[in-house]
Amino acid sequence: MARTAPGQWNTFEITVEGERVQVLLNGVKINDFSNTDPARSLKDGHIGLQNHGNGDTVSFRNVRVKELGPPTGDTVIQAEGWSQANGVQTYPHAPAHGGTVLGYVNRGDWAAYDEVDLTGVTSFTARVASVNPTGGFEIRTDSPTGPVLGRVTVPNTGGWESYQDVSTPLTNVPGKTVRLYLTFNGSNMDVDDFTLRRG
């Protein structure tokens, strides 16, 4: 448990990138959430400090706000955390990172991810599982028919419980924040997560 004993200080680190919020409590990630409700958009930039209910006493100290600079490390995105999708569905799967995958894939399906910063990104790796796959998918920007940055073919990984990484270099990558698309040209595959690699 990341929480300290009653009466001792806890340290929260909250990172907000677009509609994604990541929360670390005393250095341990306790929440990673991407908002999809326009009524609760995070783009207004409000900051709120709160307690849990009447009678609670909460103290805050050393509250600091820092603007994020360009990302320098790799970015990992859970494939089932799309902001919009066509055809694909989420599927609970214990061996997956986070316990859920993007599945039920058919040719022509796609998934979109908002507010993805591609600054410095040079390659793409996805964690996939499949038994009898057909084809793979493309990495695109702007729309399901937008510019293709790269393509991967999904192999037979030996079963739905067995994952492999597939990778591709990316070309003509815009150095800005975009809506990123995975567009599927095959079927019978699960995507657990994908990594945008820099440098």
Image (cartoon, rainbow, N blue to C red):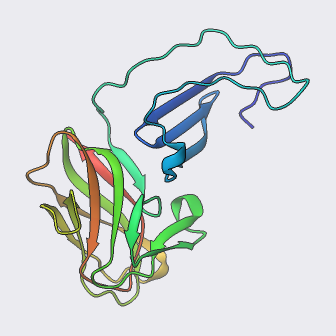
* Side of 87 where 149 appears, left or right: left
Kindly indicate the quadrant of the structure image that contains residue 53: top right
- Which of these two is toward me, 29 or 143? 143
User: Residue 137: x percent and y percent?
Assistant: 25, 73
Residue, x 46% and y 28% (percent of image)?
A: 45
Kindly indicate the quadrant of the structure image that contains residue 189: bottom left
Instruction: Check the image and report above or below for 138 versus 116.
Output: below
Instruction: Check the image and report above or below for 44 versus 31.
Output: above
Residue, x 52% and y 13% (percent of image)?
A: 64
> Dividing the image into 4 quarters, which one contains the C terminus?
top left
**Figure label count:** 0
Kindly indicate the quadrant of the structure image that contains residue 60: top right
Instruction: Check the image and report above or below for 139 versus 14.
Output: below
Instruction: Check the image and report above or below for 44 versus 160.
Output: above
* Side of 162 where 117 appears, left or right: left
Residue, x 29% and y 66% (percent of image)?
A: 182
- Which of these two is toward me, 129 or 151? 151
User: Residue 12: x percent and y percent?
Assistant: 62, 25
Q: Is residue 34 visible?
A: no
User: Residue 72: x percent and y percent?
Assistant: 29, 32
Q: Is residue 165 visible?
A: yes
User: Residue 154: x percent and y percent?
Assistant: 29, 77
Residue at the extreme left:
172
Residue at the extreme top:
62
* Side of 19 where 132 appears, left or right: left
